[in-house]
Image (spheres, rainbow, N blue to C red):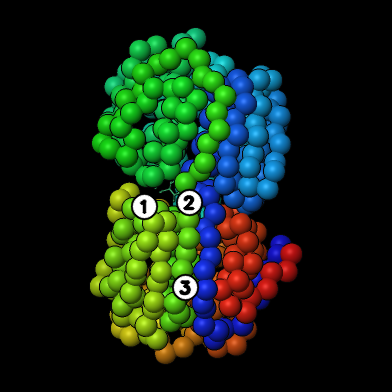
Amino acid sequence: MGKFVVTGGNKLEGELRVHGAKNAVLPILAATILNNNTSIIHDCPNIKDVDTMVTILERLGCKVKKDKNTLIIDSSQADQVKVPEELVREMRSSIILLGSILGRHGEVIISYPGGCSIGHRPIDLHLKALRQLGVQIEEKQGYIYCKASKIKGDEITLDFPSVGATENIMLAAVFGKGNTVIYNPAKEPEIVDLQNFLNSMGASIRGAGTNKIVINGIKELYSTEYNVIPDRIVAGTYLMAAAITGSEITLTNVEKDHMYSVLSKLREMGCELRYGGRRIKISAPEQINPVDVIRTQTYPGFPTDMQAQTMAVLTVSSGTSVITEHIFESRYKHAEELIRMGANIQLEGRTAIIKGVNNLFGTEVIAKDLRGGASLVLAGLKADGVTTVLDSIHVERGYEDIARDLSQLGADIHFYS
Ligand code: EPZ
C-alpha cells in the first residue's frame, strides 16, 4: 500500500485545473454498454475506480482504448451478462452496471456489493424499483440474478433520493416499453450528466436535477462523443486545502453552480471567493472562523463527500464547530486519526463537535476511506512537522494525483507507492 509524506507549513499559491468527475464518469462508462456502438468520452480522470470500471467493461466484451484523459469504448461485442465477484468487491459502485446490462440484454448476474468502511450501503431501493419495472430478481449465494423479457415503464417513487438507484432506473428504462417516471430522484449534477450523456446517444430523458425524471423508452442508441463535468468534490477538497493553509489559489474547470453549499461554508469560515467563467479564486484568512453547524444532506445540501475534508479544516478554526452526518452511518473514521494529530473532536453518534486547536502535529496516520484519506492529507499541510498518510490506495481511487496537484500549488508532499 502506498503512502503520502507531507511536511506542513507551506503556503499554497498559483492555479490548478480540476479533473473530470469520478461520480459522473462511472455511471457514464456503465451506460456505454447500451449503444452497442462506440462512445468517446473526454476528461475521464486517471483514477483507480475508472481503471476498475474499464477492466469490468473489457470482461463484459467491450474494447477500450485510452488516450490520456479520453476513453474510446466499443460495446458492439459486449455480450456478457455476468459481473465477476472479485471486481464488484473491488469497487462496490460497479452495481451501476446492473441497470445498463439489464437495459441492453434483458438479464444480468451481479455479485452482491458488500458494504464499505463508510456504511452498509444496501441496494434495496435499486431492487424494489427494478421489480416495479417488471424485472424478476433472485438473490442466491451472494449473487443477484435479474431477468426481464421487456422492461415495462412505470411511475416509481423513491423512498430516499438514492444516487445509485436513480442511475440504475435511468439505465434500465432507456429501452423500456412506454414511459418511466422517477419521483423523488437524486438531483446531483452527476445525474444530470448521465441524462445528458444518454441523450447524446439518442435517449429521450428529461427532468434530471429536478423532483421528477421522465424516461421515454426508445428503440436504439447511437455512437457519441462527450465531455464529463468537473469533479465538484475534488474542487471542494482543493479549496479546503487553501482554507487550512491560509492561502490564495485559483481553480480552473470548476462549475460553481454545483458547489454553492460548500462555497457558502467557506465564506462563513472567512474565506473570500471570486468567480469568473469556470474559475474560482479563494483567499483564506490566517486562521478560519468556526462554523455553527454543517449538516450533510442530499444535493443541493452540503455533500457528505465533503464532510471529512471540512472537518480537517475546522480542527484549526478559532472556535467550536458542529458537523452532523445524515447520509452514511459510519463516516467519521478520519476523526480518530485527526485526534492523533492533536485535533480536539468529540463524536456523539452522527454528531461531531470540533474545538479549534492552535496547531496540529505531524505523525503517522492511516487512510480508512477515500475522503477520510484526503482529509488527513489536508491536515498534514497544516501540521507542524511531517505527516505520513498510510494506505494511500483509498485516496488514489478518487483523486488523479493529489500529491502532483498540491505540489504544483507549493505544498511539500511526496507520494511513495
Ligand atoms: C453515491 O453513492 C456516490 N458514489 C458516493 O460517493 C456519495 O457519497 C453518495 O452517492 C451520496 O451522495 C458514486 O456516485 C459512485 P446513495 P451511492 O445510494 O449511490 C442509502 C465518494 O466518496 N441507500 O445515494 O451508493 C445508503 O445506505 C462516494 O465519491 C439505501 O438505504 O449513494 C446511504 O445511507 C462515497 N438503500 C444513502 O442511501 C439503497 O438501495 C445514500 O446512498 C440505496 C442507498
**Viewport quadrant of the N terminus:** bottom right
Identify which amino acid the numbered label 3 is placed on: Ile
Q: Which residue lies at the image location 59% right of the left edge and 66% below the top edge?
A: 405
Contact between labelled residues 2 and 1, with CB atoms less than 8 Å apart: yes
> Residue 355 location, x and y as percent?
35, 81
In percent of width and height, residue 155 lies at: 29, 22
* Percent coordinates x, y for residue 217 in the rendering: 40, 16
Q: Position of residue 352 (x, y in %)?
A: 35, 69
Residue underneath mark 2: 230
Q: For the view shown, which residue lies furthest in the right direction?
A: 417
Q: CA distance from mark 1 to mark 2?
A: 9 Å
**Considering only vertical position in the picture, is 223 above or below 298?**
above
Q: Are the residues flagged by discs 1 and 3 in contact, CB closer than 8 Å?
A: no
137 relative to 302, above or below: above
Residue under the point 34% across and 70% down? 273
**Does mark 1's beta carbon lie closer than 8 Å to ligand 1?**
no
* Residue at the disc numbered 3: 249
Residue 49 seen: no
**Distance Cα–Cα, label 1 vs label 3:** 19 Å
Q: Look at label 2 and name its amino acid.
A: Pro
Q: Which class describes the residues within 10 Å of circle 2: few (<14), some (14-19), or many (20+)?
A: many
Along the line of sight, the residue nearer the viewer: 229 or 96: 229
User: Mark 1 sits on what residue?
Assistant: 258
Q: Residue 254, relative to residue 317: is it above or below?
A: above
Specify which label sits upstream in the sequence, 1 or 3.
Answer: 3
